[in-house]
Image (cartoon, helix red, strand yellow):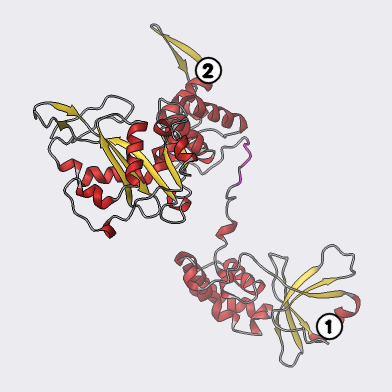
């Protein structure tokens, strides 16, 4: 059966099964009367159509093995037009405008003499070289007569992600201007010096800019001598053309950047964990419903209190404890006192979580309905700082009341983000607008606190 001899079929020919490489060709055209078969070699970048009689073509079946195969070309994009960059489509359409009228001239385009005349006319009309026309024709035919075979093969350009071996000649494009630094080839030894320089001069608590780290690296590892200048000894560097450029230093810094290590070294591990670490979830994921987890924390309110007996006496700033339900974000308990953050204050706030909120509000002249603040229970789990709830203090809370207490590391306010955010809202909505409010805080934790009184 010879029904496989049809247009666009790809056939592999071998003299025997043991042949490692065969001759692969694509059938371009079959005469309707099955008198002529036109093929083109697939593994030849100079191939042109080969015209044979049908009998001549089928005679190869006697002494040669043949196999119909699939041919996939990763350069051919089988995509809708909207997925192809506009510039690439313009290149494709320009090429198709040139060869489109030619490839429809079947079977004349397959005859070498007729093809030469047709190509010459196109070269004259479009002002291009004939090799360009033949290249377009070959790509179109070998690609299965698909217009997208004329798209540019930009994915084959360069070597994305591959490092080049350093040789005698300088790699990279030539400089556009003569005054630009050329640099040197970066081999393994130079990369090692870059890494050491970044570790010594960039990944430090001094937080030096990358430009300074580059300069210090040159002075440390690329000097050729020293110059005495008074009491100072200054490294002598070779000419610029024998030094790596800042662009090269920056490229390898970016390419080999370990962001976690860099931020940890420059800002400290605690600051990294607090401000820069990846956030892979939220507190809510740990709570399956109301009452499953509470967060408790204390803050010194940004307001000064005065004595009720004599308003000229400032008695200090109050400590505010807030207990909040993680799932619903509802405040379930609170306590305001003048003693510093302590187990006593935390205990009072926890006691308030079980209090009847209607009675609690009535004590301060506020009337609410029972359904406005429905919370008078202890949680299954309680997240707190290490200070107030560390050690044996909460043992009764755990054993008698069945509350699982989880304490967090110091300086990790982000682990109790919901209650910390509540403090911010409390300041913005209430404390900031009352007499005696502190309007600015100059430093947090690391130094003295400065303020101006409202």
Stretch of the chain drawn in magenta = 162-167
User: Can you say whether 114 is above or below 306 in the image?
Assistant: below
Q: Main secondary structure of the magenta part?
A: loop
Residue corresponding to mark 2: 224
Q: Nearer the viewer, residue 84 or 260?
A: 260
Mark 1 or 2, nearer chain start: 1
What is the x, y in percent for residue 36?
75, 86
| Image side of residue 429 versus residue 278, left or right | left
What is the x, y in percent for residue 214?
46, 28
In space, the residues marked 1 and 2 are separated at their CA atoms by 76 Å
Image point 75% across, 83% down: which residue? Answer: 37
| Image side of residue 147 versus residue 439, left or right | right
Residue corresponding to mark 1: 58
The local crowd at label 2, few if under 14, some if 14 to 19, many if 20 or more residues have their Cα within 10 Å, is few
The extreme bottom residue here reads: 33
Q: Decide if residue 420 is in sight here.
A: no
């Amino acid at each position: 059966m010879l029904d496989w001899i049809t247009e666009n079929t790809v056939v592999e020919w071998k003299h025997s099964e043991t042949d490692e490489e065969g001759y692969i060709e694509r059938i371009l055209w079959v005469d309707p009367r099955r008198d002529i078969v036109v093929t083109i070699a697939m593994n030849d970048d100079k191939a042109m159509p080969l015209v044979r009689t049908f009998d001549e073509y089928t005679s190869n079946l006697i002494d040669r093995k043949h196999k119909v195969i699939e041919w996939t070309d990763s350069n051919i994009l089988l995509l809708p037009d909207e997925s192809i960059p506009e510039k690439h489509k313009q290149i494709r359409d320009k090429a198709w405008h040139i060869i489109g009228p030619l490839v429809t001239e079947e079977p004349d385009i397959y005859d070498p003499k007729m093809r030469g005349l047709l190509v010459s006319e196109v070269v004259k009309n479009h002002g291009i070289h004939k090799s360009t026309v033949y290249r377009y024709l070959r790509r179109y035919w070998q690609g299965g007569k698909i217009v997208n075979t004329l798209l540019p093969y930009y994915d084959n350009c360069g070597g994305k992600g591959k490092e080049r071996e350093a040789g005698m000649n300088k790699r990279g494009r030539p400089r556009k201007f003569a005054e630009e630094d050329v640099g040197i080839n970066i081999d393994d030894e130079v990369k090692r010096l870059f890494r050491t320089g970044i570790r010594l001069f960039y990944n430090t608590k001094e937080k030096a800019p990358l430009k300074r780290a580059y300069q210090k690296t040159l002075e440390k590892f690329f000097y050729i001598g020293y110059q005495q200048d008074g009491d100072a000894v200054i490294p002598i560097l070779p000419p610029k053309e024998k030094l790596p450029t800042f662009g090269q230093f920056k490229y390898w810094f970016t390419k080999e950047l370990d962001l976690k290590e860099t931020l940890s070294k420059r800002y400290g591990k605690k600051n990294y964990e607090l401000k820069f670490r990846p956030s892979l979830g939220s507190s809510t994921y740990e709570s399956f419903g109301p009452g499953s987890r509470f967060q408790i924390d204390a803050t010194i309110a940004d307001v000064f209190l005065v004595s009720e007996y004599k308003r000229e006496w400032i008695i200090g700033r109050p400590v505010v404890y807030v207990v909040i339900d993680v799932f619903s974000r509802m405040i379930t308990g609170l306590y305001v006192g003048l003693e510093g953050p302590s187990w006593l204050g935390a205990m009072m706030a926890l006691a308030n979580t079980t209090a009847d909120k209607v009675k609690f509000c009535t004590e301060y002249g506020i009337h609410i309905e029972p359904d406005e603040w429905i919370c008078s229970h202890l949680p299954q789990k309680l997240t707190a700082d290490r200070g107030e709830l560390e050690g044996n203090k909460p043992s009764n809370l755990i054993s008698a009341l069945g509350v699982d207490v989880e304490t967090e590391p110091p300086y990790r306010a982000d682990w109790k983000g919901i209650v910390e955010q509540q403090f911010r809202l409390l300041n913005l909505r209430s404390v900031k607008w009352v007499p005696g409010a502190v309007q600015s805080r100059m430093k947090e934790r690391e130094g003295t606190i400065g303020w101006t009184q409202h």
